[in-house]
Amino acid sequence: MCEANAYMLEGDKERLIMESVDKVTHEAEGLLLVNIFGEQKVIQARINALALVDHKILLEPY
């Protein structure tokens, strides 16, 4: 599987935002996350890092 979990960086901690993210799209309101189940969430954040081997998308608020 190629999906990853999305986490918001909060200081030195990572807070899980969404599991099994399949698609990340830039929208006017922020990042649109869509998982393999079709659930969608818009997050006001930017990508800090992608750790694909670890299946992680690390986001930071703006």
Image (cartoon, rainbow, N blue to C red):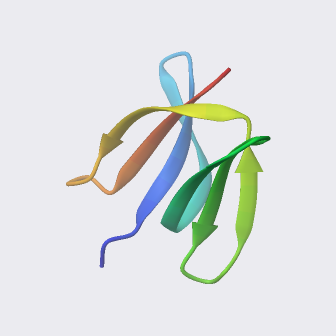
Tag count: 0
Q: Residue at x 48, y 18 (%)?
A: 12
Q: Residue at x 54, y 80 (%)?
A: 36
In the image, residue 5 above or below residue 51 = below
Q: What residue is rendered at 66% in x and 81% in y?
A: 38
Q: Position of residue 42 (x, y in %)?
A: 75, 51
Q: Quadrant of the C terminus?
A: top right
Horizontally, residue 51 falls left or right of residue 41, namely: left
Q: Is residue 62 left or right of residue 53?
A: right
Residue sitting nearer the eye, 15 or 28: 28
Q: Quadrant of residue 8?
A: top right
Front-most of 9 and 40?
Answer: 40
Rendered location of residue 26, percent (x, y): 61, 47
Give the percent coordinates (x, y) of residue 47. Answer: 49, 34
Q: Residue furthest right?
A: 29
**Quadrant of the drawing holding the N terminus:** bottom left
User: Would you place residue 5 above or below residue 2 in this image?
Assistant: above
Task: Give the answer, above or below, for where 46 lies relative to 24.
Answer: above
The residue sitting at the front extreme is: 28
Find residue 3 and report its horizontal and vertical position in percent. Answer: 39, 69
Q: In the shown orientation, is residue 27 left or right of residue 25?
A: right
Residue furthest toward the left?
53
